[in-house]
Amino acid sequence: MIAQTTRNNLRRILDGSHRQMFIGGEWVDALSGAVIESRNPANGALLATVPAGSQADIDRAVSAARVAFEGPWSRFKPYERQVLLLKIADLFERHWDELSLSDTLDMGMPIARTRAGKNRVLGMLRFYAGQATALHGETIANSLPGEIVSYTRREALGVVGAIIPWNAPTAASIWKIGPALATGCTIVLKPSEEAPLTPLLIAELMAEAGVPAGVVNIVTGTGSNAGAPLASHPDVDKIVFTGSTATGQSIIRASAGNLKRVSLELGGKSPVIVCEDADLERAVPTAAMAVFANSGQICIAGSRLFVARAIHDEFVERLGAFAKGLRLGDGIDPGTEIGPLISGRQRERVLHYLGEGPAEGATLVAGGGRPDRGDLAQGHYIEPTVFAGVTDTMTIAREEIFGPVIAAMPFDTIEEVIQRANATPYGLAAGIFTQNLSGAHRISNALKAGSVWVNTYHAIDPAVPFGGYKMSGYGREGGIEHLHEYLNTKGVFIRID
Ligand code: NAD
């Protein structure tokens, strides 16, 4: 169960009271005085109100970030930034119960899952800490006349604007803040209005660790009032965005004014391919949780399931049984496997797709609507759902649902399934289940996706780049490439003859 001290520590976000945002090292309200509510998606209870930041608040946060970037922060040596990141990691380790509970309350992810995210987030912080002292330019031989030495420098880009969605607030925040601190950038982070509370908790830990004022700023608010001004701000050097493809497109347009750098982690409609020789004991639960984890609210959800025709019927039957056996409930209960969706609006969106499936000819195998248990009536729950008899052209096979919905389809040949798997505007991730080594290589090479998992799913490591092909975005998070996105490269030539 949750430790009593953690409950006490979190009482302030549980009791409906007001939380301020963090700008220039100070806790402040929106200049307009406006607020937005954050509610628990499991029962509708008011958790807190937070400032509804707007253009004026973004302006002062960007200005604080600029002052810090040009001032004291620029004198931090790589080793000092490394020590700071390691201290933050230690604080996260100590406060992980609070961070995971905050995510569970604010966006519904089951506590077992938010707790299990600990090693990933600590791993990110410690990976970035390691990189802080490993960033370097190169000495490059040139062919110029005379004697000229040439080398490159990697310089911090400046003020980074970060905009994140609601489905994994802690990890999404650290994937933006970690590389900023490692490279010497400063950052203004705008959380989702649907789940703003954990980023505020993170700001407290940053301050406790000794991050100088203005280096990390958190501005709460809506996408149109706070996100859009950040994306178009003339003094922001880079925008890192995680969210929907449509918003990503508007961010590209908004960023054009000062040609700021942009990296985008966007939506997906990821294929999972189950070959005839797959180990079904492993493939059934893994393919199911490739979608049902976090109630399908994951960008990498493997929502198009292609199963070899010879095993299709058995696979779908076992998948349906697995889906029916999953335990729905309030994420705060350690036994809960499937929590609520983030909001009533999101639930209505998913219910619309649940209607589209049968209307276009798909067969319902499991789930298909809201659960009828009385104790779930106040939350935004949807049953884990499996459709069979789906075709590539149906709406549920084409559009990102962002809910617990699997569209299962048979396939006959590897060439055919590769072509069908790639026939989507998205390219974020893909899964393959097979025991054939050459088949695994062949298919994974042919898939147009930023991450491919064979006989597993959801494997994400801070040292391995993650990101999209096609309309799933560009830029990478994780790995050295990630750090380079927060750096400018300068070529220097020095005549020495
Ligand atoms: P969203 O695009 O609606 O919102 C994401 C963030 O953008 C929020 O903070 C929101 O306030 C802000 N925003 C909205 N409109 C804006 C605008 N015009 N200008 C600037 N900011 C704006 O997405 P969502 O509904 O919160 O999240 C779900 C989507 O995110 C899905 O499409 C999912 O696939 C995607 N996602 C992708 C990844 C990834 O790593 N690829 C991870 C998580 C979620």
Image: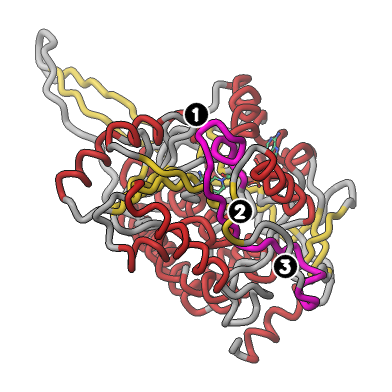
| Circle 1: residue type | Pro
Q: Which residue is mark 1?
A: 425
- CA gap between label 2 and label 1 equals 26 Å
Which is in the foreground here, disc 1 or disc 3? 3
Q: Is residue 288 left or right of residue 60?
A: left
Nearer-N-terminus badge (2/3)? 2
Q: Is residue 272 left or right of residue 390?
A: left
Q: Is residue 394 magenta?
A: yes
Residue 371, disc? 3
Q: Secondary structure at mark 3?
A: loop
Where ligand 1 lies, by image quadrant? top right
Mark 1 within 8 Å of ligand 1, using the beta carbon: no
Q: Residue at x 37, y 40 (%)?
A: 411
Q: Position of residue 284 (x, y in %)?
A: 40, 63
Q: Which residues are magenta?
A: 373-401
Q: Is residue 28 left or right of residue 400?
A: right
Q: Could you tell me if the residues under marks 1 and 3 are in contact, i.e. CB atoms within 8 Å?
A: no
- CA gap between label 1 and label 3 equals 32 Å
User: In this rendering, does residue 66 appear at all?
Assistant: no
| Circle 2: residue type | Leu
Q: Nearer the viewer, residue 11 or 348?
A: 348
Which is in the foreground here, disc 2 or disc 1? 2
- The quadrant in which residue 352 appears is top right
Q: Residue at x 61, y 36 (%)?
A: 395
Which is in the foreground here, disc 2 or disc 3? 2
Q: Position of residue 78 (x, y in %)?
A: 35, 53
